[in-house]
Image: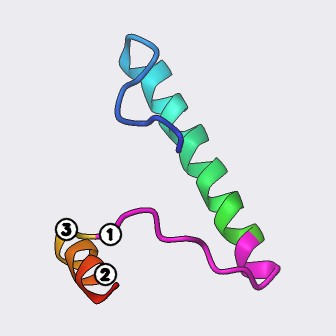
Amino acid sequence: MTGTRRARYRGLPKTRLEHVYSVVALNLIRLDAYWNGHALDRTRTSHLTRLELALAA
């Protein structure tokens, strides 16, 4: 979503600022979804859940 696993900058101050911007953006997305009554989609499912869904189908 935001690509926070790898920083595009070198150096701690710029990397920290990039992470702060990412967190602010994610929180704004969550607040917008909360205020408008939309549930956020779950992006990850466990291997067991996927297996359970496959067997149930």
Amino acid type of the residue tagged 2 in the rendering: Leu
Q: Return the residue nearer the eye: 11 or 54.
A: 54
Which residue position is annotated with label 2? 53
Which residue position is annotated with label 1? 45
**Measured Cα–Cα span from mark 2 to mark 3:** 10 Å
Residue depicted at 47% across the width and 70% down the height:
42
**Residue 34 appears left or right of 52:** right
Furthest residue in direction bottom, as rendered: 56
**Measured Cα–Cα span from mark 2 to mark 1:** 10 Å
Q: Return the residue nearer the eye: 9 or 1.
A: 1
Residue depicted at 82% across the width and 79% down the height:
36
- Relative to 44, is 1 above or below? above
**Residue 57 appears left or right of 38:** left
Q: Say whether marks 2 and 1 touch (CB < 8 Å).
A: yes
Furthest residue in direction front, as rendered: 57
Badge 1 element: loop
**Residue 33 appears left or right of 5:** right
Q: Say whether marks 2 and 3 touch (CB < 8 Å).
A: no
